Amino acid sequence: MQIKRQQRIDAEYGIPKSTQYYWEKHGLWPKRVKIGARAVGWIADEISAVMKARATGADDAAIKALIVELTAARQA
């Protein structure tokens, strides 16, 4: 499992920190994972799945459902 930090997501996808946190708060972005005492990141496969859904025109409801699926799979 690869973890991406916020700066890398911004560089790869052009999504600034404020947008990532806004989307996360509203269920449109995967929840971050703690990777250290003061560090967080996001699971790369989850980010890729969300970005693929956005690219194919998924609406907010579909993305929220995808996030629920991804979160359930993470805990399994």
Image (cartoon, rainbow, N blue to C red):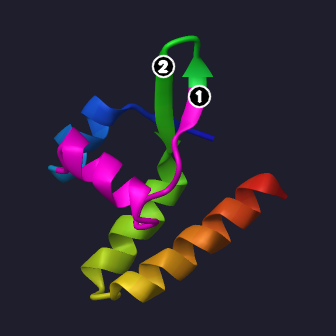
Q: Do residues under tags 2 and 1 come within 8 Å of each other at their CB atoms?
A: yes
Which of the numbered marks, if any, corresponds to residue 39?
2
Q: Position of residue 32 (x, y in %)?
A: 52, 42
Q: Residue 72: name its quadrant.
A: bottom right
Residue at horizontal 65%, vertical 73%?
69
Which sits in the foreground, 61 or 41?
61
Q: Which residue occupies 17% across, 44% down?
A: 16
The relative height of residue 46 versus residue 64 in the rendered view (above or below) is: above
Above or below, comparing residue 20 to residue 10 in the picture: below
Q: Quadrant of the C terminus?
A: bottom right
Q: Within the magenta stretch, is there residue 20?
A: yes
Q: Measuring from the top left, give residue 38's x and y in whole percent.
A: 49, 13
Q: Which mark is residue 34?
A: 1
Q: Amino acid at mark 2?
A: Ala
For the image shown, how many numbered marks are present on the structure?
Answer: 2
Q: Which residues are magenta?
A: 15-34
Image location (x, y in percent) of residue 40: 49, 28
The quarter holding residue 71 reads: bottom right
Q: Residue furthest right?
A: 76
- Residue at left 18%, top 39%? 11
Residue 73 sits in quarter: bottom right
Q: Position of residue 49 (x, y in %)?
A: 46, 67
What amino acid does circle 1 point to? Lys
Dot 1 alpha-carbon crowd within 10 angstroms: few under 14, some 14 to 19, many 20 or more: few
Q: Is residue 20 above or below residue 58?
A: above
